[in-house]
Image (tube, rainbow, N blue to C red):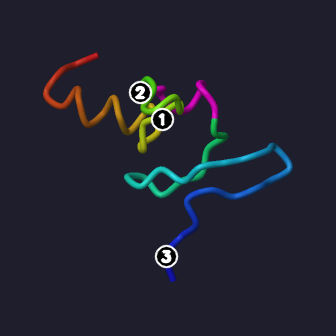
Amino acid sequence: MPRKIYIQTELGTEKCCPMCNDYFPFDEEFYFKNGFKNGVQKWAARCKDCYMQSYRTGYDI
């Protein structure tokens, strides 16, 4: 059975990152905003950590 993308916890709404399969609070601390489309805010699918890892491969931080 596939994992749910969003779950409700005592912390509020949490979203599952498809890359690391962990749930994080669905806010700007853990996910990037990708602008607007048709007046609706769009968010990155992956958490910030996975997003940065995928775009910084080969670079030392």
Vertical arrangement, residue 30 with respect to residue 21, above or below? above
In the image, taking residue 40 as reference, residue 49 lies left or right, namely left
Which residue in the protein does label 3 denote?
2
Q: Amino acid at mark 3?
A: Pro
Which residue in the protein does label 2 denote?
34
Q: Amino acid at mark 1?
A: Trp
Residue lying at the far bottom in this picture: please name it: 1
SS class of the residue under badge 3? Answer: loop
Vertical arrangement, residue 2 with respect to residue 38, above or below? below
Q: List x then y, in percent, for residue 15.
A: 59, 49
Q: Is residue 44 magenta?
A: no
Q: CA distance from mark 1 to mark 3?
A: 21 Å
Q: List x then y, in percent, for residue 30.
A: 56, 32
Circles 1 and 3, Cβ within 8 Å, touching? The answer is no
Among numbered discs 2 and 3, the one appearing first in the sequence: 3
Which residues make up the magenta segment? Answer: 27-34
Residue lying at the far right in this picture: please name it: 10
Among numbered discs 1 and 3, the one appearing first in the sequence: 3
Q: Residue at x 76, y 55 (%)?
A: 8
Q: Nearer the viewer, mark 2 or mark 3?
A: 2
The label shown at residue 24 is: none
Q: List x then y, in percent, for residue 25.
A: 67, 40
Q: What secondary structure predominates along the stretch shown in magenta?
A: loop
| Front residue of 21 and 13 | 13
Q: Which quarter of the figure has residue 53? A: top left
In the image, taking residue 38 as reference, residue 5 lies left or right, namely right
Which residue in the protein does label 1 denote?
43
Circles 2 and 1, Cβ within 8 Å, touching? The answer is yes
Residue lying at the far top in this picture: please name it: 61
Q: CA distance from mark 2 to mark 1?
A: 5 Å
Q: Which quarter of the figure has residue 45? A: top left
Q: CA distance from mark 2 to mark 3?
A: 25 Å
